[in-house]
Image: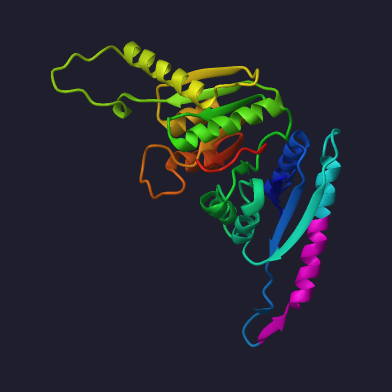
Amino acid sequence: MREIVVGVDASVASERAMDWALGEAQSSGRPVRAVHAWSTPLWTGVGPGFGPIALGTPTDGAEIAKGLLEDLVAKGLSRCPSGPPVTVHPELRAGDPGRALVSASEDAGLLVVGGRGHGFVRNAVLGSATSYVLHHAQCPVMVVPETGPPRARIARVIVGVDGSPSSRTALRWGLDAARRADCPLIALHCWLLTTLPSRPPMQYVPPLSAYESEARSWLEQEVTAALPDTQQIDVHTELSHSGAASGLLDMTLADDLLVVGSRGHGGFASLVLGSVATQCSRHARGVVVVVRADQERLDQ
């Protein structure tokens, strides 16, 4: 059974990530591994003429980090709503948080991270560890924003659809999430005239409504092909005449779950994370899950 990994530190974003990881564990019956990575400098200068002073030993740093991790897990479990019990395994790692979480993701079904942790630049939208795992994680990544309501019932699961392999994986992942949350699934396709095939000069150009009808027909076929069995989940198809990132962000509310593929049809094939997934992870009002074409759903 693939576990849920959550990255924890002393930030508000991490606290919310823990709450979402526990909620996902309750709905899927999976254990949680709470990973805290730490590094403590042993020496620092205190001023001219004074020289460096010892802050402590690696053993001291490990003990402090261990106490912090145990406290974060205990507080998270105390906030967990009534429901099936959740097993949480705390794991302490020394070193860079991003690399530690990517390593932990190798055997995980889901990696949950906060939109911003403790770092040198407090006004950064995404922390460096979160940005790193979005590019390198070996499982779907859930990004929980620092602000917003506490975890509650998911109102809707919204999936960005563009016909790419990763967007089809996102549809299947989103269907599983909607089933566990018992909520509707919205398959959203954003389109512009500039993204449609060009026509030869002097050829008849249909009205905008004809393009929209064509796009809707394509979207319904794409959803049916990706989700032949919707498992009695209410699935809706929606169109947005807009850019992909802006359309998805405008549609998503704070109590929605947005699922996107890591890379769509645009951009360079060598990129691991596309611009749409990056923008959604940075600016969405709600929680975002980023999946790749070769990544499994949580229930597999």
Q: Position of residue 148 (x, y in %)?
A: 67, 35
Vertical placement of residue 91 versus 267, above or below: below
Q: Position of residue 62 (x, y in %)?
A: 77, 69
Q: Position of residue 47 (x, y in %)?
A: 64, 81
Let me know if residue 185 appears in the view: yes
Q: Position of residue 36 (x, y in %)?
A: 71, 58
Could you tell me which quadrant the N terminus lies in?
Answer: top right
Majority SS type along the magenta span: helix
Lateral position of residue 188 relative to residue 138, left or right: left
Quarter residue 235 falls in: top right
* Nearer to the camera, 198 or 17: 198
Let me know if residue 254 appears in the view: no
User: Colour mode?
Assistant: rainbow
* Nearer to the camera, 124 or 78: 78
Vertical placement of residue 93 versus 260, above or below: below
Could you tell me which quadrant the C terminus lies in?
Answer: top right
* Nearer to the camera, 130 or 234: 234
How many numbered discs sit on the rendered protein? 0
Q: Is residue 64 magenta?
A: yes
The residue under the point 67% across, 68% down is 39
The residue under the point 38% across, 13% down is 213
Q: Is residue 179 magenta?
A: no
Query: Which stretch is magenta?
Result: 50-70
Residue placed farthest to the left in the image?
202
* Nearer to the camera, 112 or 171: 171
Lateral position of residue 100 relative to residue 284, left or right: right
